[in-house]
Image (spheres, rainbow, N blue to C red):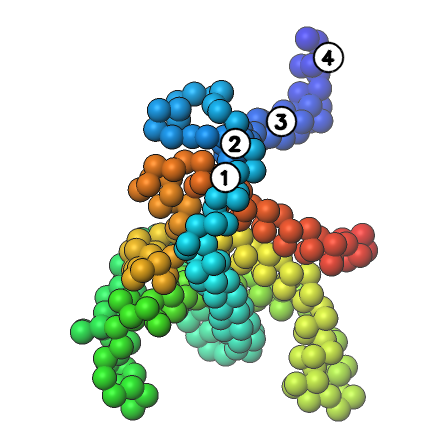
Amino acid sequence: MRRFLASLRDGVGFDILLVGAAMVFLIAMAGLPLIYNVLMSFQQVDMFTLGSLIRPWAGFQNYIDVVREPAFWLVAKNTFIFVFFSMGGQFVIGFALALFFAQNFPGASTIRGLFLVSWVMPGLVVGAIWSWILAGDFGVLNTILKGLGIIQSNVFWKSDPAFSIWAVVIANIWLGLAFNMLLLSVGLAAIPRDLYEAAELDGANALQRFWTITLPMMRSTIGAVLSLGLIGTLQQFDLFPAITEGGPANTSTVAQYWSWQMSFQLYDFAKGATISVMMLVLVLIASIIYVRSTRHEVRG
């Protein structure tokens, strides 16, 4: 006990204690539920066996049943559209804004701070706002598009099967835009200005400086932004019940919302857990690819 108290006083033991407390918290609040969810995806779970830990074993039958579901390929396509175009829109517009505000013009910090409003707002609030904006009869977006002459009649973004998934994509791009801009701005600020000055003296134009200096120097930052964007997009749930509720006819249902529907509307907890495990595998694969692609940078 004396040695333990001495280790706490010298700082080393105290650091271990802090790390240990954080690890215990993570294991209790994240690790155990994750293991429980994976285990449930291999069992037969219904309302009568939900409270039991030991249930009939199903093996991979739940995964086979999920793939055989009539809505599986539609949900897979919607998930791909939602993830790809949400991440692409957030990254491209966020990068453009980061480059724009890097010019340090008067009022840049104030205007940049206004973009953070979307980041701090709850997802359900953002969904409610965009539900009004995308309304077919009185929505602001239709009014703007008709004023610009892009459309002639109202587009029913939330109830038209051709546009419902894009309605959620638009809202999610706005929601995650500030996060991408903030991280990319930090990456831009870390690039030495001397490199740009030397390239400019050598006659490189703005586009050449961007391709030869900005992108290579921000490789690790871009990888982190895309990895976190993938995880955040796959976790996005609030926008769907607030805007489209997965409709019409599952045309805006994605994997995370489908998992919730299976578990808490159809009470098929095993299939809900199975869908979430499938998503977890996708995130792990993306994380491994990111770590391997930046391994040399971490070592350096």
Q: What residue occupies the far top of the structure in this picture? A: 1
Q: Residues within 10 Å of mark 4 (few under 14, many from 20)?
A: few
Q: Identify whether 151 is placed above or below 261.
A: below
Disc 3 target residue: 20
Return the disc, 4 or 1, that comes first in the chain's sequence: 4
Q: Is residue 107 above or below residue 151?
A: above
Q: Nearer the viewer, mark 3 or mark 2?
A: 2
Q: Earlier in the sequence, mark 3 or mark 4?
A: 4
Residue shown at 42% from the left, 71% from the top: 111
Q: Label 3 sits on what residue type?
A: Gly
Label at residue 62? 1
Residue under the point 41% across and 66% down: 169
In the image: residue 114, left or right of residue 218: left
Disc 1 and disc 2 in contact, CB within 8 angstroms = yes
Which is more toward the observer, 67 or 139? 67
> Which comes sooner in the sequence, label 3 or label 1?
3
Q: Position of residue 95 (x, y in %)?
A: 55, 72
On the image, the x and y values in percent for residue 289 come to 69, 55
Relative side of 220 to 68, left or right: right
Q: Residue at x 27, y 59 (%)?
A: 128
Circle 1 SS class: helix
Write down the residue under mark 2. 58
Q: Which mark is residue 150?
A: none
Q: Amino acid at mark 1?
A: Asn
Q: Quadrant of the N terminus?
A: top right
Find out whether the residues at labels 3 and 4 contact each other: C-beta distance under 8 Å.
no
Amino acid type at circle 2 is: Ala
Q: Secondary structure at mark 2?
A: loop
144 over 81 or under it: above or below: below
